[in-house]
Image: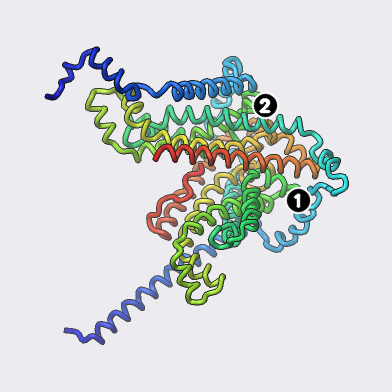
Amino acid sequence: MRELISDIDAAAIADTRARYPLAFAAPLPVRLGRWGAWLAFVVFTAYCFWTFEVSPVRLWAGSGKLMEVASHLFPPTVGEAFNDYLWALLQTIAMAFIGTVIASVLALPLGLLCARNVLPVRIAQFLFRRTSDTLRGIDQVIWALIFVRAVGLGPLAGILAIIISDTGTLAKLYSEAIENAEKKPVDGIRACGGNALQTIRFGILPQVLPLMLSNALYMFESNTRSATILGIVGAGGIGFYLADRIRTMLWEEASFIMIMILVAVYLIDWLSKLVRRRLIGAAPDTAGGLH
Amino acid sequence: MTSPSAVALSFETEFRALGARKRLVSLAYGALFLLALGLSTWVGEFDPLKLLRSLPRIHEYAVKTMPTLSMATLWHDLNEWFYAPGKWLTLLWETILIAYTATLLGTVGALALCFHAAQNLRRGTVSYWLVRRIFEVARTIPDLVYALIFVFAFGIGPLAGILAIAVHTMGGSGKLFAETVENIDMKPVEGLRATGANWLQMVRYAVLPQVLPNFATFTLWRFEINVRTASVIGFVGAGGIGQELYTAIRMLYYEDISALLLLLVVTVMLIDVGCEKLRHGMIGKEH
């Protein structure tokens, strides 16, 4: 006979609880562990807030000023330098494009050398991987500042920064793609007597090229966003004007530049999505959305 | 009926025509690419020769940043190289804490808003549209620009940096969270709706259990990114090790640059490895 909901009374629940305690609650050590983790989380977070003096008073005072800034952001005003802005914005996109193209070429050999199935020498692989980690681990803005000191102010420093940091990122993505490639074509080429280079060219590259292109396009999108700030340290592009307008508190012009950046980024995203769909069909985003 | 040779012939011509068309399309794409590259070279004032000429200078710079270490006096040389370990490690710790606090605040913001920005759960056209725009603006304006503005509003120091990275994180994670929510299995949602649960209960019991592992993975990964970002917000006075690095690079304290960068790279690598471990642990639990 089936029990009805109305038949279940407190005694029945208590009875079930006694027989199957784990259905009602996790065992005590697990519960204690959870409480401990929460406690540690809360204490650590409180410590952070205390260290940084995040207090309601400070936040209140700051938001007052922020509101003032926000009110000055409208209406966005062009000022007299629209042509300069437009040129700098185009320069930003151009920097991102050249940087990505060169980086995606440079990353190919590095990516191959980082891949376990291409170079099965542990120590060499370790070295190449750490190289790409180092390139990637240092933020693009730091590279830009370094190159500004090494080669002077201007877009060349920005392009170099993009090349260096993207070579690291793309080499990692490429090597992952190469490691996930099907082994059978490689075996086939080897069995036919193909040498190492031929194996890579005919066994691996055809498999991974669409993925690599997709990654490179994705990096281009990402770079148009990140290149907008390289100008803050003098490495070319729109960032110079934006930082300057903020520092001199010309908020209306700053907001105009921000809107220009927003529009440019939308356009580039849309264009890149279009090209990606044409080139490789409706492949899913492989690199995920970094931004 | 057509003879086999005629079939073969028609196949041949068709095949050739297709091949020719494909080549034409590839050619057109190649031309477009070259055009874009040419335009970029012009607009970006990019001169390969200038790049080549600058290589010796970059090399010279790199050599100068290398510390002078000799085997005989290694300990002394290392001490000379890392002459301020206490100060630098404190700044490094501050940088990590900035990244942590910012990730936390940004994620809370993203979590609170993302369900409104998901097509399948949206509560109204206005809130859906508004939240999406908020996310877009938050992640498209670079974090360094937010940092500049917040330094003006909250004063020089880590608070400005935390808020800047938090805003950016909210935009970036919010978008990813919303996309995850859009891909959930809707059956539990319908089940809960049928029992008369309100929107908040539905989100809590039908949606959250499905998306939480993904959210956690994204958040860990975001933390890795934020550590990198936190290392540069000091360039505009928003706290962390960036200020020290900025001074070293601007003032050409060559050996400081390599010491600080080495510390930074090691820290970033350790954090990446740690997050990777945590992520694998979580994915293991999930299956």
Task: Tell which of B113 and B48 is nearer to you.
Answer: B113
Residue at position x 73%, y 38% in the image: B246
Q: Answer whether labels 1 and 2 touch (C-beta < 8 Å).
A: no
Q: How far apart in space, not on screen, are marks 1 and 2 (Cα)?
A: 29 Å
- Residue at mark 2: B157
Q: Position of residue B30 (x, y in %)?
A: 50, 66
On what subunit does the disc labeled 1 rest?
Answer: A
Q: Position of residue A74 (x, y in %)?
A: 53, 30
Up-down relation of residue B126 to residue B37 (above or below)? above
Q: Is residue A221 visible?
A: yes
Task: From the viewer's perspective, tell me whether residue A219 is left or right of residue A3.
Answer: right
In the rendered image, which quarter is residue A4 located in? Answer: top left
- Residue at mark 1: A150
On what subunit does the disc labeled 2 rest?
Answer: B
Q: Say what secondary structure mark 2 lies in.
A: loop
Up-down relation of residue A239 to residue A281 (above or below)? above
Task: Tell which of B264 and A232 is nearer to you.
Answer: B264
